[in-house]
């Protein structure tokens, strides 16, 4: 299969590239390297350079459509995005330019290339808005009422995917991702709390918990998520599919688990709750099991241990 991965130098995207290349596929990567890094693709570039081509390009550029048309991928995995919810609130125009206009450039390229499918990284943590706790874990049938510009753009792209399927027979699967964590995640950003905790725990610095720490998330390991993407290349067409564990884990529980694995007895620092933060989140994965044959297999303790090992090894290499 000839595959193309937008955002392929990012945390999830590069892990997907590694999986695709390990299975013998030809892969093109589009990434502007604003948040991704070529270091994430080091193994792929070393071990399979003749099967991998990396194109440094912003998806807002119409040249993206021309490139995709020229490369003729069979399947486009669209992961490139502006992913910072708070930035989307502060600058919704930029958020829409990247996530909506950029996605339209990708869809136009796939249409013109005759691609058979687009697999899209949607957001299970934002498209459903703030569900009633009684509705957790959230099913895909739950109304989509996002309350952030970021969530709105993900919903809008889902609508465009449906339209392209009806108008142009371009198949799609939209994967509504829970809170993805794993090696290569940025410990300096706001979104990856597991990576942030890992970096600080290994540095012997206190981790900050905002609010009382009772807020919950559905933490799903990156290798499990990548498996869902690969399965979606041939299954789940025309559907939005949740990719999560279905389990709520509080920030306090996450910190306790990671501190134990890291061998740290430092207490977490407390800070005021952040305005607008979602109180609880978990995604029902029944549709993923039915249509993709997918279930998560990585437990939080072993997944966070892999993250800590990754950051520990990277720190050792820098010395």
Image (spheres, rainbow, N blue to C red):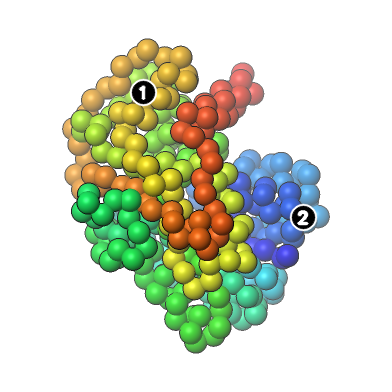
Q: Which residue is located at x 60 percent, y 59 percent?
A: 231
Q: Which residue is located at x 50 percent, y 60 percent?
A: 290
Label 2 to label 1: alpha-carbon separation: 40 Å
Crowd class of label 2 (few under 14; some 14 to 19; many from 20; radius 10 Å): few
Q: Which residue is mark 1?
A: 256
Q: Position of residue 123 (x, y in %)?
A: 40, 56
Vertical relation: 26 (above or below) 118: above
Q: Position of residue 48 (x, y in %)?
A: 78, 49
| Residue 296 visible (yes or no) | yes
Q: Which residue is located at x 25 percent, y 31 percent?
A: 213
User: In the picture provided, is 283 more to the left or to the right than 171?
Assistant: left
Mark before the other along the chain sequence, 2 or 1? 2
Vertical relation: 133 (above or below) 80: above
Check the image and name the residue furthest to the right. Answer: 50
Mark 2 in CB contact with mark 1 (< 8 angstroms): no
Q: Which residue is mark 2?
A: 24
Q: Position of residue 131 (x, y in %)?
A: 24, 55
Q: Which residue is located at x 49 percent, y 58 percent?
A: 288
| Residue 77 visible (yes or no) | no
Q: Give the structural element (helix, strand or loop) at label 2.
A: loop
Crowd class of label 1 (few under 14; some 14 to 19; many from 20; radius 10 Å): some
Q: Position of residue 9 (x, y in %)?
A: 59, 50
């Amino acid at each position: 299969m000839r595959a193309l991965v937008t955002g392929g130098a990012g945390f999830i995207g590069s892990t997907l590239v590694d999986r695709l290349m390990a299975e013998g596929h030809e892969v093109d990567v589009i990434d502007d390297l604003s948040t991704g890094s070529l270091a994430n693709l080091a193994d792929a570039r070393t071990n399979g350079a003749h099967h991998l081509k990396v194109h440094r390009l912003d998806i807002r550029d119409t040249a993206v459509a021309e490139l995709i048309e020229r490369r003729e991928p069979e399947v486009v995995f669209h992961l490139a995005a502006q992913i910072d919810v708070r930035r989307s609130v502060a600058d919704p125009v930029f958020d829409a330019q990247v996530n909506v206009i950029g996605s339209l450039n990708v869809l136009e390229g796939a249409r013109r290339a005759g691609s058979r499918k687009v697999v899209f990284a949607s957001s299970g943590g934002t498209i459903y808005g703030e569900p009633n706790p009684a509705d957790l874990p959230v099913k895909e049938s739950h109304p989509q009422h996002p309350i952030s510009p970021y969530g709105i753009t993900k919903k809008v792209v889902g609508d465009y995917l449906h339209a392209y399927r009806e108008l142009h027979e371009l198949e799609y699967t939209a994967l509504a991702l829970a809170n993805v964590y794993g090696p290569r995640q940025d410990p300096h950003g706001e979104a990856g709390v597991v990576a942030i905790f890992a970096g600080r725990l290994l540095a012997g610095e206190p981790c900050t918990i905002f609010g009382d720490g009772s807020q919950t998330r559905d933490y799903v390991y990156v290798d499990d998520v990548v498996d869902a993407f690969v399965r979606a290349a041939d299954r789940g067409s025309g559907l939005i599919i949740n990719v999560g564990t279905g389990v709520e884990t509080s920030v306090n529980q996450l910190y306790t688990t990671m501190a134990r694995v890291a061998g740290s007895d430092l207490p977490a620092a407390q800070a005021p709750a952040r305005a607008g933060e979602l109180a609880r989140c978990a995604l029902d994965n029944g549709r993923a099991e039915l249509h993709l044959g997918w279930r998560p297999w990585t437990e939080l303790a072993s997944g966070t241990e892999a993250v800590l090992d990754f950051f520990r090894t990277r720190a050792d290499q820098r010395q």
